[in-house]
Image: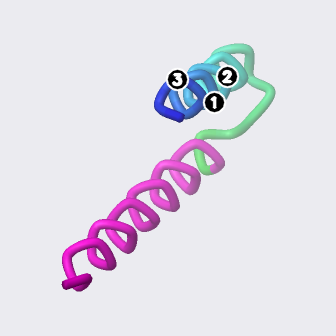
Amino acid sequence: MQRRRIAHMRLLGELYNYEHVDSSVVLDTLYLIDLFSFLVMGLKRRRP
């Protein structure tokens, strides 16, 4: 799972380098990943 996530981030970086996506797409994606990881960690802590 970790390798797939790294591959997706690398692809997003390459798309940005070749100017196929805008910086706002990259920042929005990073924000969503951060938000998702925060929510998942919060759920893991609440379980008994």
Residue 30 colored in magenta in the image = yes
Q: Which residues are magenta?
A: 25-48
Label 1, residues with CA under 10 Å away: few <14, some 14-19, many ≥20:
few
Seen from the viewer's position, the closer of residues 43 and 28 is 43
Q: Position of residue 17 (x, y in %)?
A: 64, 16
Label 1 vs 3, first from the N-terminus: 3
Q: Which residue is mark 1?
A: 8
Seen from the viewer's position, the closer of residues 24 and 10 is 10
Whether pointer 2 and pointer 1 mark residues with C-beta atoms closer than 8 Å, the reply is: yes
Numbered disc 3: secondary structure? helix
Q: Position of residue 14 (x, y in %)?
A: 66, 16
Q: Main secondary structure of the magenta part?
A: helix
Is residue 48 placed above or below 29 in the rendered structure?
below
Amino acid bearing label 2? Leu
Label 3, residues with CA under 10 Å away: few <14, some 14-19, many ≥20:
few
Q: Position of residue 40 (x, y in %)?
A: 38, 68
Amino acid bearing label 1? His
CA gap between label 2 and label 1 equals 5 Å
Numbered disc 1: secondary structure? helix
Q: Would residue 20 appear left or right of 12 to someone viewing this image? A: right
Whether pointer 1 and pointer 3 mark residues with C-beta atoms closer than 8 Å, the reply is: no
Q: Picture quarter containing residue 48?
A: bottom left
Color theme of the render: rainbow
Q: Which residue is mark 2?
A: 11
